[in-house]
Amino acid sequence: MKCNWCDSSQATSSSGTVYWELPDGTKAVTITETPSVNCGDCGMKYQEDTTVKEIEDQLFLINTKELEAQLSYKELMAKPRLLKRNYFDFSS
């Protein structure tokens, strides 16, 4: 795997904890066990664009008023959706 920051081939898949502000700005949540990339050369730990988009889309599509302050990535992605897709995303 290649690091997006330093182009090193020492990047590996990992998981970590991230902190996310809800789309409406009412609160932040802690998401544990989030798929991440960890670079052994530059030390960066980050989420790939696809993971960021999955989290952002899911937070638009679920009832965030009932969302726990902390949950795992799998728990977040398993939450029932109110809509089938993010109709506010005009990039696709």
Image (tube, helix red, strand yellow):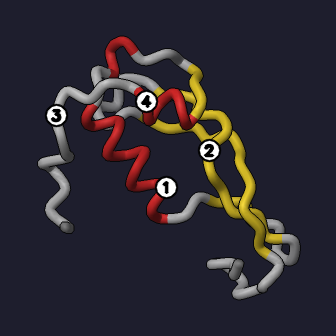
* Mark seen at residue 78: 4
CA separation in Å, label 2 and label 1 = 8 Å
Work out whether mark 4 precedes mark 2 in sequence or the reverse, and give the earlier one.
2
Q: Are marks 2 and 1 in contact (CB under 8 Å)?
A: yes
- Looking at the rendered structure, the kind of residue marked 3 is Leu
Work out whether mark 2 precedes mark 3 in sequence or the reverse, and give the earlier one.
2
Residue 6 left/right relative to 26: right
- Looking at the rendered structure, the kind of residue marked 2 is Thr
Q: Which residue is the site of mark 1? A: 51
Q: Which residue is the site of mark 2? A: 34
- Looking at the rendered structure, the kind of residue marked 1 is Thr
Neighbourhood count class around disc 2 (C-alpha, 10 Å): few under 14, some 14–19, many 20 upward: many
Residue 79 sits in which quadrant?
top left
CA separation in Å, label 3 and label 4 = 14 Å
Residue 61 sits in which quadrant?
top left
Looking at this rendering, what residue extends furthest in the right direction?
40
Q: Quick one: SS at disc 1?
A: helix
The front one of 51 and 6 is 51
Q: Quick one: SS at disc 2?
A: strand
* Mark seen at residue 83: 3
Q: Quick one: SS at disc 4?
A: helix
Q: Residue at x 50, y 38 (%)?
A: 20
The front one of 78 and 21 is 78
